[in-house]
Every structure is written in C-alpha cells, then in structure tokens.
Amino acid sequence: MKNLLGLLFAVLLLGVTAERGRSQSSSSAPPTDQSKYRLMPNDRLAFRIEEDPVKSSDPTAVTVTPLGEIHFQVTRGSDMSVVVVARGKTIAEVRAELKARLDADYYQNATVSLNVLNHSVQQGKVLFVGPAIMGTVPLRPGETKTLAEAIIQLGYNDFVNLKKVTVERLDPVTRQLSTIVVDVDGVIRLKDRSKDILLQDGDRVKTVNKIFNL
C-alpha cells in the first residue's frame, strides 16, 4: 500500500513539474538587443503614453495577436484603440507608426514608451513547395532571414531557375494573398542584395527548373 501511494505521489509530482516546464517555455525573457528584434505573434510588450490624461505608474501590457496585430488603447480611460500590424517589425518601427497615428487623431505630440516584456518561443517557418526546391526553413523568434539565405540553406543546383522565384504571402490584416517575384540569381551571382527580401512566417516559396530548348 505504501509503495502504491508513493508511486501515485511521484506521478503527480512529475505531472506538476511537466506543467510548470510547459508554462515557463511559452515565453522567455526580453531579447538581448531589442533594436534588432522583429516581433512575432504572442510577444508581450509594455506600453505607455506619457501624456495619457489617466495617470498610472505602471505601463499597460499588450500582446501581439495571432494575426500579428497589437491593439493600443488611446487612453486608459477609454476602450478606443489604435491597431498596428507589428509582426515582422522592430520596436522602433511600431513605435513610430503608433506615434504618427496618435498625433494625427488624439495627441499633439505623444511620447510613446514601448518595450518587449517577453518574446514568444513559437518558431515560425517558411515552406518551399517546389518543384525545383522543396523543404521547410525555420524562423527562430526574432530571427531575420532573406530569401537568398534560405535557398542557400536548403541547397540548389544549376537547373533551378533562380531568376524567377515566387513568394506567396498572406496579409495578416486584409487576408489577401500577394505574390512577389524575386531575381535570386542576381542576389547570389551578382551580389545585388537590393533584390533580396526578408522572409516572414507563413510564406510559401515556389521554384521551377529552367526550360532548355533542345
């Protein structure tokens, strides 16, 4: 009987430990360099408008939604909010867009404080659907990766038509699908990085083989 009770206690203890581990792994400490970090869904940020007429010593916690948006309250005393698409953007880019929106409609010269509290440990991915190149390229939280870097990572041969690589991207706000055609050959062979683009979580990349006239 004592052995049975001991076994049950051990199972319960392991369950609690595992649950704590899962809860702790859902987010992590702020990124070391917030200036370069690019926001992802489930990131938590501290937000404050210094000129908010409803004063408080504590900032407001906001979260990047699964669609990549952040809803910022115009003031603590109102439910009105400004929605900014944050996924893939830096803190500085989001702060600048938010300030411009606030100054246009609500404040004369808003002082916006914005910092990452916890960044998501969720890993994004980019899917290469072929037929010339197939595979998945992971995007770690806050990581930036270009299309050319991803293709080099997966590997390619001389038969792939890198002059016309197609990226399909779903807009998180409008839900409209856009298509971007990139001359990756110019990026890799001619070292023209201006032609390259930054990949985003959920991108689908299509590549085809060259057509030879026989």
Image (spheres, rainbow, N blue to C red):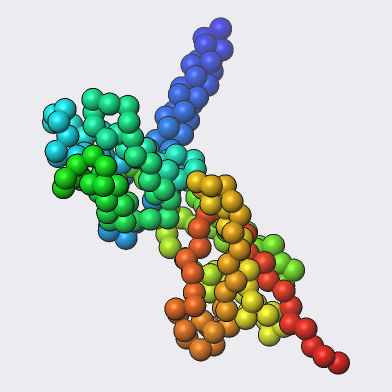
Direction from residue 84 to residue 213 in the image, left or right? right
Question: Which residue is at the far bottom?
Answer: 214
Nearer-the-camera pick, 132 or 138: 132
The number of numbered discs placed on residues in the rendered structure image is: 0
Q: In the displayed structure, would residue 28 be above or below residue 192?
A: above
Question: Which residue is at the far front?
Answer: 105
Q: Residue, x 23% and y 46% (percent of image)?
A: 103
Q: Image quarter for residue 151?
A: bottom right
Q: In the displayed structure, would residue 160 be above or below residue 140?
A: below
Instruction: Residue 121 in the image: state x and y as whole percent.
Output: 44, 45
Q: Residue, x 82% and y 90% (percent of image)?
A: 213
Nearer-the-camera pick, 203 or 141: 203
Q: Image quarter for residue 184?
A: bottom right
Indicate the quadrant containing the N terminus: top left, top right, bottom left or bottom right: top right
Q: Is residue 24 visible?
A: yes
Question: Which residue is at the far top?
Answer: 1
Direction from residue 130 to residue 170 in the image, left or right? left
Q: Is residue 154 visible?
A: no
Q: Residue, x 16% and y 47% (percent of image)?
A: 109
Instruction: Residue 75 in the image: state x and y as whole percent.
Output: 24, 32
Direction from residue 136 to residue 90 in the image, left or right? left
Instruction: Residue 211 in the image: state x and y as whole percent.
Output: 78, 83
Indicate the quadrant containing the C terminus: top left, top right, bottom left or bottom right: bottom right
Direction from residue 105 to residue 135 in the image, left or right? right
Nearer-the-camera pick, 136 or 25: 136
Q: In the displayed structure, would residue 38 be above or below residue 50?
A: below
Instruction: Residue 20 in the image: state x and y as whole percent.
Output: 42, 29
Q: Residue, x 29% and y 47% (percent of image)?
A: 101
Q: In the displayed structure, would residue 160 be above or below residue 111?
A: below
